[in-house]
Image (spheres, rainbow, N blue to C red):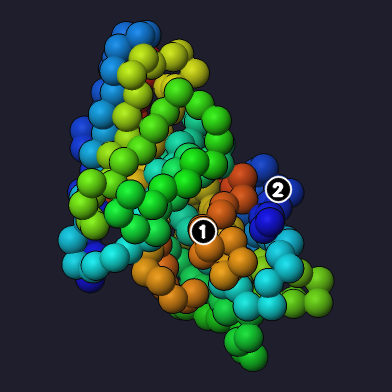
């Protein structure tokens, strides 16, 4: 079975500062994929970034980067230069062949960006 | 690219009434399909997962059921709603390779009264 843990129910950050959202995972599959999604108050789910278990480099997409530490089974999301529009729920998720490629989510972190 | 159509956007139903939420997918074939439920301010709970027509796994015991009558159609149903069925329901689809992102519908906010 696979499991995603996000231990920060809420985080606050000042505008223009960087913030790290934590995510740890557990799986027995050697091959797996890790995803981060953003959910604004409107409810839509927005895909941010993907990291594969065999990727040598940490994934980056604009202001988003993923700090992937495979031995520690962590996949933290780093948002640089926070903007007011970054205020939202953030979810970490994973899928793996051993779980029939099901996409499983963590409980999320509510990020608030203060002006 | 893939598009998920999910309706209705909001729904208010009395306890004991039936439910039918429909989700259709465009732009892909043979996708993995999901139904998630989200309580206010909480995470996404996986309800049903389908890898093909009539191939559906239920993740949590409840009074909900799901059907996939066509490759790109996924339906969530209940014969008798409970107050605890209130929440935000999201349909999602995802390709078969490990690195494909999931695409989500706009969600249905269900309030059982």
Label 1, residues with CA under 10 Å away: few <14, some 14-19, many ≥20: many
Taking the image as drawn, is residue A72 in sight?
Answer: yes
Task: Relative to A56, say whether B48 is above or below.
Answer: above
Residue at label 1? A102
Task: Relative to B56, say whether B37 is above or below.
Answer: above
Label 2, residues with CA under 10 Å away: few <14, some 14-19, many ≥20: some
**Residue under the point 61% across and 45% down:** A107
Towards the viewer: B62 or A33: B62
Q: Quadrant of residue B107?
A: top left
Residue B52: percent from the left, percent from the top?
34, 58
**Residue under the point 49% across and 74% down:** B98
Q: Nearer the viewer, mark 1 or mark 2?
A: 1
Residue B21: percent from the left, percent from the top?
27, 34
CA gap, disc 1 and disc 2 = 24 Å
Query: Where is the N terminus of chain A found, in terms of image quarters?
Result: bottom right
Asked if residue B33 lies left or right of residue B45, the reply is left
Taking the image as drawn, is residue A44 in sight?
Answer: no
Residue at label 2? A8
Contact between marks 1 and 2 (CB within 8 A): the answer is no
Asked if residue B42 lies left or right of residue A30, the reply is left
Residue A60: percent from the left, percent from the top?
53, 80
Chain letter of the residue beneath label 2 in the structure image: A
Residue B60: percent from the left, percent from the top?
55, 35
Give the residue furthest to the bottom.
A56
């Amino acid at each position: 079975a696979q499991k995603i843990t996000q231990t920060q129910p809420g985080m606050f950050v000042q505008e223009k500062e960087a913030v790290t959202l934590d995510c740890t995972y557990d799986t027995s599959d050697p091959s797996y994929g890790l995803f981060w999604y953003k959910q604004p108050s409107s409810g839509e789910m927005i895909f941010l970034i993907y990291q594969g278990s065999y990727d040598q480099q940490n994934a980056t997409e604009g202001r988003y980067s993923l700090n992937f530490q495979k031995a520690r089974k962590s996949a933290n999301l780093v948002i640089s230069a926070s903007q007011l529009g970054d205020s939202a729920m953030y979810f970490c998720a994973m899928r793996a062949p051993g779980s029939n490629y099901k996409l499983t989510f963590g409980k999320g972190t509510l990020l608030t960006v203060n002006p | 690219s893939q598009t998920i159509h999910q309706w209705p956007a909001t729904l208010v139903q009395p306890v004991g009434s039936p439910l039918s939420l429909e989700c259709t997918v465009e732009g892909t074939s043979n996708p993995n399909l999901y139904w998630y439920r989200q309580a206010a301010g909480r995470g996404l709970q996986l309800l049903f997962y389908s890898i093909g027509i009539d191939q559906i796994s239920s993740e949590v015991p409840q009074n909900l059921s799901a059907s996939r009558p066509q490759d790109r159609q996924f339906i969530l149903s209940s014969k008798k709603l409970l107050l605890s069925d209130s929440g935000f329901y999201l349909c999602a689809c995802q390709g078969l390779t490990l690195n494909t992102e999931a695409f989500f519908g706009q969600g249905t906010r269900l309030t059982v009264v």
